[in-house]
Image (cartoon, rainbow, N blue to C red):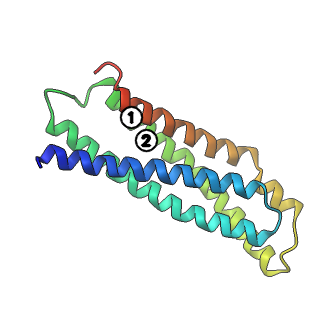
Amino acid sequence: MSTYDWLLFLHMTGAFLLVGGGVVAAALNIASLRRDRPSEILVLFGLIRIAVAAIIVGSVLALVFGLWLVNEAPFAYSYSDGWVIAAIVLLIAGNAIGGYAGSRDARTAKYAEELAAAGDTPSKELQARVRNPITLAGNYVSGLLLVALVAIMIWKPGA
């Protein structure tokens, strides 16, 4: 296999980790909306942390090896291509927005942990935090940016 083939393999591995982690995190987030008991919400938010690890590793792999691929194929792609710039911007924006929403979810998980230790009874405050529109919007916008990123990477508009 050539260097280009290895770089493409590692870039695609990162992309699959990123997308897979995003899908799992979204599914677990939706599942948490249907739960009342703090212990159940805590378990789901704990599993989201594993998905976030896949998102972080996938983002780094996709970015590093994607940029290396552009360097390896200078006659096919350029760092100044619009789709390359758009992909980088979408990756950074999606991770920043997702990270912000994730930090809010981490505080909700901490609250769920306190409630679970204090009797595990359902709480309207916990439900309000799980359903917080700002946090949900951040999670969903991050997911939509991920979908846009994948679309740009597949179709490479302008290439």
Image quadrant of residue 75? Answer: top left
In the image, is residue 78 above or below residue 13? above
Image quadrant of residue 143? Answer: top right
Q: Give me the residue at 44% from left, 35% from top.
A: 149
Q: Which mark is residue 91?
A: 2
In the image, is residue 47 above or below residue 82? below
Q: Amino acid at mark 2?
A: Leu
In the picture, measured across the screen, residue 3 lies left or right of residue 51, that is left
Measured from the top left, where is residue 67 in percent x and y?
A: 25, 41
Measured from the top left, where is residue 68 in percent x and y?
A: 21, 44
Which image quarter is the C terminus in? Answer: top left
- What SS does tag 1 mark? helix
Q: Give me the residue at 45% from left, 59% from top.
A: 54
Q: Nearer the viewer, residue 29 or 91?
A: 29
Q: Give me the residue at 35% from left, 51% from top.
A: 14
User: Outermost residue toward the front?
Assistant: 1
Measured from the top left, where is residue 7 in percent x and y?
A: 21, 47
Q: Amino acid at mark 1?
A: Ala
User: Outermost residue toward the top?
Assistant: 158
Residue neighbourhood size for the residue with mark 2, other residues' Cα within 10 Å, grouped as few (<14), some (14–19), many (≥20): many
Q: Nearer the viewer, residue 88 or 34?
A: 34
Residue receiving disc 1: 87
Residue neighbourhood size for the residue with mark 1, other residues' Cα within 10 Å, grouped as few (<14), some (14–19), many (≥20): many
In the picture, measured across the screen, residue 12 lies left or right of residue 131, that is left
